[in-house]
Amino acid sequence: MGEKTRVLIVDDDVSFASSLSDILNEMGYDAITVNSAEETLQKVKEMSFDVILMDIKMPVMNGVETYKRIKKINPQTVVIMMTAYSVEDLIKDALKEGAYGVVYKPLDIEKVVKMIEAAKKDGALVMVVDDDPNTRKTLKDILEDKGWVVTLAENGEKAIKIARERPLDILFIDMKLPLLNGLETYLAIRKINPKATAVMMTAYRQEMKDLVEQALKKGAYCCLYKPFDPEETIDIIEEIKNKTKK
């Protein structure tokens, strides 16, 4: 039996935090609670957590500002935001800063547990970089359905920013991106994380031929040509993970 998943619950509603902690502890998690931003930052300095469940709307310092400070202590911390309110600006800010996701109160415990398991899954953290929102959504849905943790970027600059904040394992990068192209994006991320494996993608086989060849020479794993069967991505991830285990 492996170590229990350690979860920190942050909520100024003491009763809610305690109830959620009881439920998660009964389900086999190691859940503890704090009720303020100050307590949260102190606790994060003292120990590491697999996942933090963070209320967005708290007094003195809201959950998003608290998360920003947590990232300075431990940039790789996985945070799931919780809210009972319509705070779209804060939610948008939290996701922009790299929060794993948002759950709404009253909580669907099954959904919370599924999100915790996906967030701390001992597998690949995958990033899809593509300026086409449909491609991003399609790949995200397929990969998350298989249990992978997926983050998205619509351009190279955003992808590089995320790479500085998260230990990415596998990258799916479109070759034809605005401003920085796929090759430039890949090379920049490789400097940040040399262990990340990149799969290039393009719908322009001839136009992108030279850039694809350069990417492959620089260590990219392969190139997928659009339109492709999105299920191919599952096979490729499995290949990469099996290769890295050897």
Image (spheres, rainbow, N blue to C red):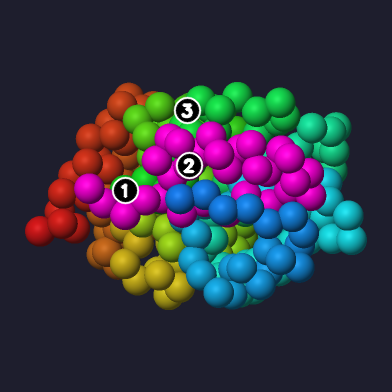
Task: Give the answer, above or below, for where 70 lies relative to 85.
Answer: below
Relative to 238, is 141 above or below?
Answer: above
Which of the numbered marks, if any, corresponds to residue 141?
3
Labels in figure, total? 3
Give the magenta range: 1-29
Name, please, the residue furthest toward the right.
60
* Residue identified by numbered label 1: 123
- Residue 192 image offset from top left, x and y in percent: 45, 73
Precedes in sequence: disc 2 or disc 3: 2
- Where is residue 9 drawn, in percent x and y? 62, 49
| 214 displayed left or right of 245 | right
As for residue 206 lying within the magenta part, the answer is: no
- Name the residue at the left extreme: 246
Contact check, label 2 and label 1, Cβ < 8 Å: no
- The spot of residue 242 in percent (x, y) is 16, 49
Q: Nearer the viewer, mark 2 or mark 1?
A: 2
39 vs 16: above or below: below
Residue drawn at the location 44% of the way across and 63% of the way down: 167
SS class, disc 3: helix
Of 174 and 5, nearer the camera is 5
The image's mark for residue 25 is 2
Mark 2 → mark 1, Cα distance in angstroms:
24 Å
